[in-house]
Amino acid sequence: MMHDLDPATDLHFTRVVAAPRSLVWECWTRPEHIPHFFVPKPHKVIGCDIDLRVGGRFNTTFEVEGNAMANNGVYLEVIENEKLVFTDAYAEGWKPVPEPFMTAILLLSDTEDGKTRYTAIARHRKPETRQQHEDMGFYNGWGTVAQQLEDYARTLMAKA
């Protein structure tokens, strides 16, 4: 199920993450985990506030080249251990924002060997925004995030 992807406005990739789906879900839904993987290094997450419910906030603050960048949004869909949909098109309380960038869809499923099939989709309102996101490095950036997530999850599995 790929959500009727539109190549004019959607970017996506799928990879297998060497961690169980429940752990990948935990990493994506608990604020203490987000700083360990959510932006490509050397950038950092310096703040994260999650209210995991439809309409709840998913707010992060990044540090990029010494500058703090707020990235606020809300969850549109939450299906435990399976699907997260969040967007910066709204702020908490369903307040529209003037210049939204994208809606993200994260799909998780089990592989036969206990790993997680991880699909990330970025939906944009306009082809120009989609192209801007691709030019910014969507595939490398989201791929790096997936690898950082896998590396971090392995540290959690080693502690268990």
Image (cartoon, rainbow, N blue to C red):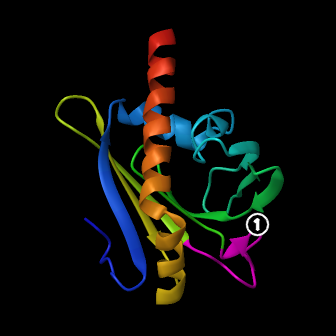
Q: Left or right of 120: which side holds 135? A: right
Q: Is any atom of residue 160 visible in this view?
A: no
Position in image of residue 50 (x %, y %): 70, 48
State yes or no: residue 144 in magenta.
no
**Viewer-closest of 88 and 14:** 14
Is 116 left, or right, of 129 in this rendering? left
Left or right of 67 in this view: 43: left
Q: Is residue 66 above or below residue 116?
A: below
According to the picture, the residue beneath numbered tag 1 turns out to be: 92
Of helix, strand and loop, which one carries label 1? loop
Please tell me how many numbered marks the rendered image carries: 1
Position of residue 155 relative to residue 70, above or below, is: above
Q: Quadrant of the N terminus?
A: bottom left
Is any atom of residue 29 visible in this view? yes
Dividing the picture into quarters, in which one does residue 46 lie? top right
* 107 and 62: which is toward the camera: 62
Report the residue at 48% width, 79% height from top.
Answer: 130
Residue for point 41% across, 59% down:
139
Q: Residue furthest left?
A: 112
For the residue pair 116 and 53, the one nearer the viewer reads as: 116
Image coords of residue 43 (percent x, y): 68, 46
User: Which of the two residues, 114 or 68, is positioned nearer the viewer here?
Assistant: 68
Q: Main secondary structure of the magenta part?
A: loop
Residue stretch rendered in magenta on the structure? 89-102
Q: Residues within 10 Å of mark 1 (few under 14, many from 20)?
A: some
Residue 155: x percent and y percent?
Answer: 50, 19
Taking the magenta stretch, the answer to whether it contains residue 98 is yes
- Dot 1 amino acid type: Glu
Question: Which residue shows up at 78% across the image and 60% down it?
Answer: 70
- Horizontal and vertical percent position of residue 107: 38, 54
